[in-house]
Image (cartoon, grey):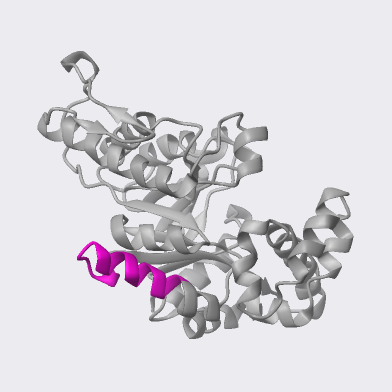
Amino acid sequence: MKLDTALAAALADVPAAARAAEETGFDTLWTAETGHDPYLPCVLAAEHTKRIKLGTSIAVAFPRSPLIHAMTAWDLQALSGGRFVLGLGTQVKGHNERRFGVTWDSPGPRLREMILMIRAAWDTFQNGTRPSFEGKFYRFTLMTPFFNPGPIQHPKIPIYIAGVNEYICRLAGELCDGFHVHPLHSIKYVREFVQPNIAKGAAQAGRKTSDCVLTTSTFVIAGDTPEEQAGLRQLVRQQISFYASTPAYRPVLEAHGWGEVGPRLTEKSRVGDWSGMADLITDDMLEVFAVTGRWDDVPDLLRKRYDGLLASVSLYVPFRTAERERWQKLTSAIHS
C-alpha cells in the first residue's frame, strides 16, 4: 500500500510544499477543486518535483468541456514527464447548477461520454487519428494542425473517477484506471458495494477488476494525548456530518443501517445548524468511518484497514511542512 497526500497551499507556496512532500516520501500529491482550481497547482508541482506523481482528486467534470480536460491533462503529462493522473468527479446537482452555473443532465452517462471523448482527443493528439466521436452530450469531429498539441513521450494518462453510487462504480470498472473512494466510506461499504460493482463493470468490458485500482483519503483521529485526539475528533465529526447530509452519499450510511440519519442531517444543513449536525454523528459512526489512535500506531492501523483493499491511501489531513518530521516517520513506516 502506498501513502499519498493532499496539497493545500496557496499558489505561491506550491513549489516549496510540493518539494517537501516529495522529499518526505509521499507517492502521489493530489489537488482538489474546493476553494481553488485543481489544475494550476499541478503545473507548479510538476515543475519543482521529479519523482512524485501528481493528480486531481478531483476536478469537477461538467464545468469544463472534455477537450479542455484533455488538453490540460496532456500538457501536465508532458510537463511532469508522465507523472499526471486525471481525476474527475461529477459533484452534485446543486453545486453544478447553483455554484458552477452549468446544466445537470444524466450525470453518469454524461461522464461516460466525457471519458470516451477525452481518450478520443488523446488519440488524435498522439496519432493524428481523424476525430470522429459523436455522442448524445458531446461531439468531437474537428481538429486542425494549428490546434493539435501533437504527440508526447508518455501518452498513456490514467483516468480516475470518484463517486458513491452503483453506476459510477460500474463505470470505473468498465473504463477507468482508478477509482477515488469517497472519504466518507467504511470497509463494509467498499467490500460489499464498491468492489462488486467495479467488478461488474470490468466484466462487462472484458477487463480484470485489478485494472481499476482503488485509492482514498481517510479520516484519522490521531493524537498522542486525549486532548489532541479530542480536538481532531470534533473536526472529523463535523466533516462526516457535512458529507452525510448530501443525499447522494446515503448508500454509505445505509450500508450500516444509519439511513435515517441522512434526512435529519440534510434538514439541519438547510437551516445552518452545523453544530447540531455534528451532534448526530455518534461514537459508533466515528469508529466505522475513521481511524483512531496514537500517531505511532497510525501506520499499522492503516495497514490493518486497507492492505489488500486499496492501492494507496492518504490522510484527510493536509500535509504541512511544519509537521514534516511526523510525516516522515509515517511515510517511512508505511513503506517499510
Numbered circles on residues, count:
0
Question: Would residue 17 be found to the left or right of residue 73 on screen?
Answer: right
Q: Which secondary structure type mostly characterizes the magenta part of the structure?
A: helix
Q: Quadrant of residue 265?
A: bottom right
Question: Quick one: 37 or 70, which is closer to the camera?
Answer: 70
Quadrant location, the N terminus: bottom left
Name the residue: 50% across, 66% down.
328
Give the magenta part as a residue range.
194-210
Q: Where is residue 325 in the image (x, y as percent from the top left)?
A: 56, 65
**Residue 255 among magenta residues:** no
Report whether 249 appears left or right of 227: left
**Residue 316 versus residue 123 in the image, above or below:** below
Percent coordinates x, y for residue 263 in the rendering: 77, 62
Decide whether residue 197 is among the magenta residues.
Answer: yes
User: Eyeballing the image, is 201 above or below 190?
Assistant: above
Q: Where is residue 288 in the image (x, y as percent from the top left)?
A: 64, 80
Provide residue 234's location: percent of width, then percent of height: 80, 67
Task: Say which residue appears at 51% left-offset and 32% top-offset.
Answer: 63
The residue shown at (83%, 56%) is: 267
- The answer to whether 178 is drawn above or below residue 137 in the figure is below
In the picture as drawn, the residue positioned furthest to the front comes out as 136
Which residue: 29% across, 35% down?
Answer: 74
Viewer can see residue 309: yes
Q: Is residue 126 left or right of residue 167?
A: left
Left/right placement of residue 283 relative to residue 132 reads right
Q: Is residue 89 in sight in this rendering?
A: no
**Residue farthest along the top direction in this orientation:** 146
Q: In which image quadrant can residue 125 be found?
A: top left
**Which image quadrant: the C terminus?**
bottom left
